[in-house]
Amino acid sequence: MQHLTLFTLAITLIATICLAKSPYQSVLQHSRIRGRQHGPNVCAMQKIQGTDKKYFTNCKQWYHRKICGKPTVISYECCPGYEKLSGEKGCPAALPLVNIYNTLGVVGAATTKMYSERAQLREEIEGPGSFTFFAPSNQAWAALPTEILDALVSNVNIELLNALHYHMVNHRLTSEDLKHGSAFPSMYQDFNVHIHHYPNGIVTVNCARLVKTDQHATNGIVHVVDRVITAVTNNVHTFIDTDDDLETLRTAVAAAGLTQMLESDGHYTVFAPTNEAFEKIPPEMLKRILGDPVALRDLLNYHILKNMQCAESITSGTPLETLQGTVLEVGCDGSDMTLNGKAIIQKKDQLGTNGVVHYINELLIPDSAKTLLELAQGSVITTATKLFVDAGLGSHLSGSEALTILTPQNEAFKEGVTMTGELKKLLKNHILKEQLSSGVLYHRQELETLGGIKLRVLVYRNSLCIENSCIAAHDKTGRFGSMFTVDKVLTPPMGTIMDVLKSDDRFSLLVGAIQTAGLTELMNQAGPHTVFAPTNDAFSALPKADLNKLMGNPQELASVLKYHMAKEILVSGGVGSHTRLKPLQGDKLELNMRNQTVYINKVPVVEADLMATNGVVHAVGAIIKPLANQSQNNSKGPCEDAGGNRPLSKEEATPAKPP
């Protein structure tokens, strides 16, 4: 019964939250629920430690106990519009309904009340009417630069009165009326105040956060805000056009043809790189981008969000889409606003009529504006990048050819690798002759390299490989080329399977066995084949009498060898925790990967991925035998065709989508 009661309560609370009309109301309702145990009309608030900043709490913040990466403490306060009564639990009493002037004194805006009297605004906000007053908190006035505050209070009849009138709208607006992207004419020359109501419940006016909302009065309503706001008359392009710190950006915007867009109606967020930010970029790279209209437009659009984000709207890292089509993670670290985890924003919330500008001291360069060589500048592929340059391939990677580079991770190379003629040739075969996306690759597709050879695409359920190298990270698509980060150095196919075996002394006994069993032609056919090739040591480990008997019986020998062969191509990167393969003869083979080693029926592979034009060879150190549970269900010997196996279904054989 107790469980049923708790379940019913949980459903009721969820339904209550879901019925809230706006994000702000949802967060307020959640705070009410969290504060309910302390009495009626109590809201749980989260305060960032070491600051005066408080927030109504949502589920995520409640459990994480962090805002902008900083720990919070929970306090319980009266919800908007209510107050405590002596001796009673919670906040049972509604605040007395008085005029706006007197309301200012009881909602934490006493300084606004004082300046309203000085500016002779008191009579207006005590009298008849229906006003909305976005009243700066006491802390907001204290935070104003001294010279600005002095200029206001030295001319109370004009400057201060105008400033206060700009905080007022000539009709009542509750938090429900403050819709995202709306604007309302203020009582100062009808200049608009700009409202943004974010999904996390934060509401801003001209980027000032509403910290106390819906404080009703007899002649209107008061919303307390965390800063003094100023009239907005210019669009975002005007900031760029008139600020000498943005001179390079101004030139770039004009060259990219973005001026008209930044002057048009909208709700943009522009992360504006300063001259200093441009100067940090290598001169050759900057010159190339500024001289390439496509790359330049991508670069600038990467600095512009599709929606307006004031600094106060951010309480944690949030991925936001740019006009370039990719995302930036906009976050915060204490009082700092961050981009992709970096505190590079110098000046926040320069508000325009069509958006907001944040000044940044570091240029953000999207992949789509980079050359292949610039794409390859990464911590996990530094070895490959250096080797490509040392091999004389830098001109291909920094030019305008449409190419795709297969870049092995650092751990794919042996320590102390040095440049040789063979390595130069091998690296050239890591560059494909066209720009590709992994999403368009398909099984057994052939790709031509700069070295003139063809590479096969191999698609498995959980991996996408090109020959033995499997893609280990998301594609990077540059201005002219793409980069696939791969887990291994590529092994291009060199001859048929029979050629591979003959060229390696470890397989001399196997070569003789294949010839004795009459399988030479099979190993030279088009395939594809996967061969688990026993080394000489594997054959030598057999009792001499058994080995002689096996070698003297071509039919039995063929059965044993066919159990080591499959009519499909499976590289080590395609082996998962439990992979099955149907051999040419006998029951299924059970494969798995443990500690970077492939096992077939519990026999370890001693060297994987010897690539051939018609398949792949994996060297094994023992003759593979059926597992015990297979042979128990099999009336024939381990070297004979067990039969009764189903082939892989079409679904099993169909490769997975690329990662």
Image: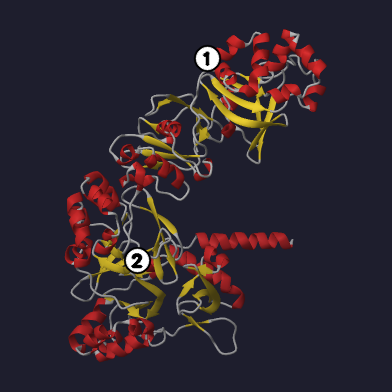
Q: Nearer the N terminus, badge 2 or badge 1?
A: 2
User: Marks 2 and 1, how far apart in space?
Assistant: 60 Å
Q: Position of residue 170 (x, y in %)?
A: 26, 75
Secondary structure found at label 1: loop
- The chosen color scheme is secondary structure
Q: Is residue 27 above or below residue 585?
A: below
Q: Which residue is mark 1?
A: 526
Number of marks drawn? 2
Q: Residue at x 37, y 88 (%)?
A: 110
Q: Residue at x 62, y 22 (%)?
A: 505
Task: Classify residue 520 as left or right of residue 114.
Answer: right
Which residue is drawn at the image coordinates 58% and 32% (left, top)? 574
Q: Nearer the viewer, mark 2 or mark 1?
A: 1
The residue tagged 2 is: 345
Amino acid type of the residue tagged 2 in the rendering: Ile
81 sits to left or right of 536: left
Which one is in front, 375 or 349? 375
- Crowd tier of the residue under label 2, counting other residues whose Cα lies within 10 Å: few below 14, some 14–19, many 20 or above: some
Does residue 372 appear anywhere in the picture?
A: yes
**238 or 585: nearer the viewer:** 585
Assess whether mark 1 and mark 2 are in contact (beta carbons under 8 angstroms): no
